[in-house]
Image (tube, grey):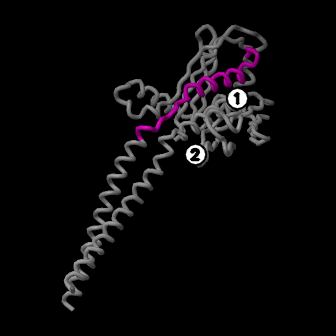
Amino acid sequence: MKLKKINKKAAIGEGILMIYRLFLVALIAIIILGVSAIFYDYYINVRDVEARIMAKQAVNCLAPEGVIDLNRIKAYEQGFLKDLCGINNLERFYVKVNVSESNNQVILLQQGDSGAAWIAELFKNKNLVSKIEKYEPGHFKQDYPANLVRDGKSVRSNINVEVFVNNEF
Amino acid sequence: MKLQTIKSKKGTNVMYQVLIHLILIALIFAMFFLASVNKVNSRTVKQQVLEKQTALLIDSAVSGTTISVFKNNKYGRIDDLHVKEGKVYASVDGLAISKGYPYFTKYSVSVDLDGDKWYVRIK
């Protein structure tokens, strides 16, 4: 009887030891394979390209054939991409369009969260953010010459487009 | 005789325990090894490339454009390609569908399979 009790205790002890050993093995397996998975993982960043495409779409919408009709776009200072241009899925984008004539601003159009602009500023410090590079916003900025039509008159103007694209995570 | 029987029984028990240990350890390693196989053979990278390329093409396309993608191409066998709620999803070489990549366009986008090609139509 006493022997049976001892054997039962021994069996429980063995069981606990086995759980501990299995846990140790699982931990070592996670570490080895986790490190190899991180090593082989690779992220392809195309946000700069998306920013460039968005800028082109914005300019083509605002100035078809190089002519901006101020009367047409005046009502869309906020949300012009969705309401005027009909482009969807704009949650990740911040687009700023500054139409100017002889360095004087004529109209400023914006769409999206301007926070993306200061996040892009943060990422200029490469030492600080080398570990989180894949979260860097895409950025594109370009000037486009255009003709501005206002009150029936056409004048040379400049469209400055700046686009920031946030990550998709 | 009784002592020999006891010793032999004990030895067998120890052997069974070691065997069970080894089997469980092998199972755990096999499980984690299979989990990392996808990363090592770069199927996820190929899937990423395909999704992003398709999304960028949709972004820059005009109405009436059709993009054709061979089912068997250099990235592997494309088992599935579809668009849903503003995202492109692709499955390469049997890899499960990922979380996709978003695209933006003012046109409607549809994907269908015809023969050995996927057709992405922008209308």
- Does B83 sit left or right of B114 as displayed? left
Chain at tag 2:
B
What's the magenta bit mostly, secondary-structure-wise?
helix
Residue B116 in picture, x, y percent from top left: 75, 39
Q: Which residue is mark 1?
A: A75
Residue B30 in picture, x, y percent from top left: 43, 55
Where residue B21 sits, quadrant-wise, is: bottom left
Mark 2 and mark 1 on one chain: no
Q: Residue furthest front?
A: B1
The residue under the point 46% across, 47% down is B36
Q: Which residue is mark 2?
A: B99
Where residue B1 sits, quadrant-wise, is: bottom left
The residue under the point 68% across, 21% down is A59
In this view, B14 is above or below A115: below
Q: Please state which amino acid type lies under the numbered disc 2.
A: Lys
Residue A167 located within the stretch drawn in magenta: no
Q: Between residues A128 and A93, which one lies in front from this camera angle?
A: A128
Q: Please state which amino acid type lies under the numbered disc 1.
A: Ala
Where residue A6 sits, quadrant-wise, is: bottom left
- Does A119 sit left or right of A80 as displayed? left
In this view, A99 is above or below B80: above
Other-residue count near label 2 (Cα within 10 Å), few / some / many at <14 / 14–19 / ≥20: few
Q: Read off the magenta span.
A: A38-67
Q: Nearer the viewer, mark 2 or mark 1?
A: 2
Q: Between residues B9 and A131, which one lies in front from this camera angle?
A: B9
- Does A151 sit left or right of B86 as displayed? right
